[in-house]
Amino acid sequence: MASSFIISLTVFLTTVIIAVNGCSPSDRTALLSFKAALKEPYHGIFNTWSGEDCCVNWYGVSCDSGRVTDINLRGESEDPIFVKSGRSGYMTGNISPEICKIDRLTSLIVADWKAISGEIPQCVTSLSNLRILDLIGNQITGKIPSNIGNLQRLTVLNLADNSISGEIPASIVELGSLKHLDLSNNVLTGSIPANFGKLGMLSRALLNRNKLTGSIPVSISNIYRLADLDLSMNRLTGSVPSELGKMPVLSTLNLDSNLLSGQIPSSLLSNSGLGILNLSRNGFSGTIPDVFCPKSYFMVLDLSFNNLNGRVPSSLSSAKYVGHLDLSHNHLCGSIPLGVGSPFDHLEASSFSNNDCLCGNPLKTC
């Protein structure tokens, strides 16, 4: 009976303290520990982190009913504190695990500070309310927490432009609410999980500029909402699944600078919704599928630096628009197609250079 009374009294007093100060004492303590592990020498943003109420005028901190819910610290910002100084942010130190004690946190954004190092605290996977984890543009090392899949409410995971190593955790496919995934420009190794297609809500998947190996999972084609897929500048091998060309929303596909081989799936070139397709700097062979149509609209079509042979497809001249075309550094031969409204009219010779025996406008006459 007495213990129940003590617990009730403790809860009551905590509620009163929050009501008076407007800030949970435990959240404030965690924020100060977080602050102590970082150094920001130029803008003085942490100078605002003073006083008892962390919910009022603490730069980048937002609350709901006295509990801290958002930490939004961006080193690249149009906030007056950055505009006035005329310089972007710079911060050293590391992300303290004490941040995990703020259990109502929905957003943790510590982005573009250039020099924050250390590892991602493993305990972030216990923040069950977290919706945004954005640590882009630092010098964070170590691995992605293996239990990242615990964050069932996460919609944005942005760890780009760091030095994160290791493999993509298998549990990442359990992030059923994830819409934006950016792991680009790190040193990730290993393969893309075969069941990557379980990420059914994903609209952007950026895994470029890593050291990923293995093949492109066919399951990616199951992600109905996926509009932007960038796997470029890795060490991926094998062929491109033809199923990728049948994805209804996919508009950008960058697979350049890998070790891919085989023939180019005709489905990629006949998909009228695919506006940016970059397959350059791989080992694709065979002919370019002759499947273009009046609905074809490519802002970028780059097939350069491969082992393609045969002719430039005649159907390409019927495409509605081709903004940037690069077929250079292949083994193509024959005359470049002509036609009314030809998409080649605005192109330079460099788009067709270094082939075996191409001719015609904009190259020399056949």
Image: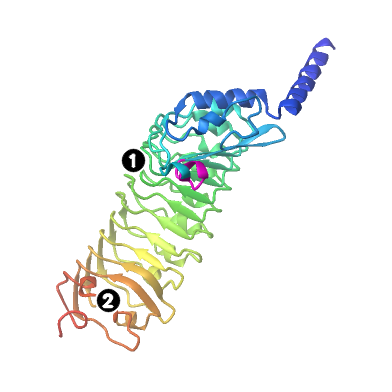
Question: Residue drawn at (45%, 58%), measured in percent from left and top?
Answer: 228
Which residue corresponds to mark 2? 347
Above or below, 117 relative to 170: above
Few, some or many residues within 10 Å of mark 1 (<14, 14–19, 20+): many
Q: Which residues are magenta?
A: 75-83
Question: Residue drawn at (24%, 71%), measured in percent from left and top?
Answer: 351
For the question of whether residue 159 can be seen, the reply is no
Q: Amino acid at mark 2?
A: Leu
Which residue corresponds to mark 1? 187
Rendering quarter of residue 50: top right
Question: Residue drawn at (39%, 55%), measured in percent from left and top?
Answer: 230
Question: Residue drawn at (55%, 48%), measured in percent from left and top?
Answer: 178
Rendering quarter of residue 366: bottom left
Q: Position of residue 23 (x, y in %)?
A: 68, 28
Q: Position of residue 52 (x, y in %)?
A: 65, 24
Question: Dot 1: what SS?
Answer: loop
For the question of whether residue 17 can be seen, the reply is yes
Report the front residue among 286 and 209: 209
Few, some or many residues within 10 Å of mark 2 (<14, 14–19, 20+): some
Report the front residue among 248 and 56: 56
Tell me the CA gap for discs 1 and 2: 37 Å
Above or below, 206 relative to 317: above
N-terminal-most mark, 1 or 2: 1
Q: Residue furthest bottom?
A: 340
